Image: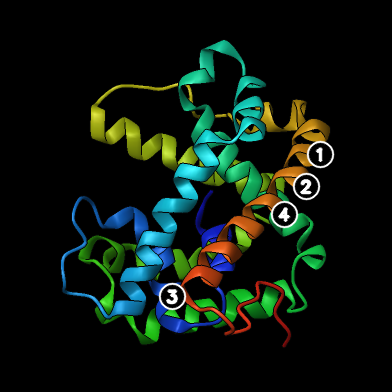
Amino acid sequence: MNYLAHIYLAGDSEDSILGNIMGDFVKGSIGDGFHPEIEKGIRTHRKVDVFTDAHEIFRASKKLMSPERRRFSGVIIDLAFDHLLSKNWASYSDTGLEGFIRKTYTLLDRRKEVLPERFRMFLPRMIEEDWLGSYRTLEGTGIALDRISERLRRRFHRENKLRGAIEEVESNYKELDNNFNMFFPELISFVEDLGSAEQAGSGFSLVRGG
């Protein structure tokens, strides 16, 4: 899953949101430099990724991608599922998507000192270009995929097949939409079970009000 889904799955706690969104930027041992709730969010992010990568529906979605882009199928489906979460947002949250995104940007900017340095460096661009909001449309999702393609090109000094990958999503859109709406409730249940194990009787819920 990508940024939007990880933030959604974090629940209402600010520290949990921070931990869940920074999960990709903390490699190896987490150490003891984070608040316990942030550390728990990082661990949740990692568990969500493991659950997702192993899930038969996610794997089936990856197989829909063409052979020449199969290498990047995980990235493509991650962003496609964030787009589909945006598209189906009202089915999963009582809070409007626009307000949810604004609240997230405000939190990240206000608490940026706790973010890993690499995350802090691109945070202004993330907010300015509205990365979370860009997933609402296929065009915006395509731009996000092309942006990743460009970063990979600069990093490895060679071209890659990820550019233009939104066509893969468009040509398999109905099946991906069906797959997402079968998979995401299972992922929500998985995260709620994690929360229940750690916060028995706390009322942990992923369907939030305003």
Q: Are marks 2 and 4 in contact (CB under 8 Å)?
A: yes
Question: Residue, x 65% and y 58% (percent of image)?
Answer: 189
Residue density around tag 1, few if under 14, some if 14–19, many if 20 or more, within 10 Å: few
Amino acid type, mark 4: Pro
- For disc 2, the marked residue is 181
Mark 1 / mark 4, whichever is N-terminal = 1
Residue density around tag 4, few if under 14, some if 14–19, many if 20 or more, within 10 Å: few
Residue 185's disc is 4
Horizontal side of residue 133 vs 163, given as left or right: right
* 155 versus 98 height, above or below: above
C-alpha span from label 2 to label 1: 5 Å
Q: Residue 107's spot in the image, x, y percent? A: 45, 83
* 162 versus 78 height, above or below: above
Q: Residue 41's spot in the image, x, y percent? A: 40, 68
Amino acid type, mark 2: Asn
Question: Residue, x 51% and y 33% (percent of image)?
Answer: 74
* 7 versus 60 height, above or below: below
- How many numbered discs sit on the rendered protein? 4
Q: Along the line of sight, which residue is nearer the eye, 62 or 29?
A: 29
- For disc 1, the marked residue is 178
Q: Residue 71's spot in the image, x, y percent? A: 46, 21
Q: Secondary structure at mark 3?
A: helix
Residue 142's disc is none
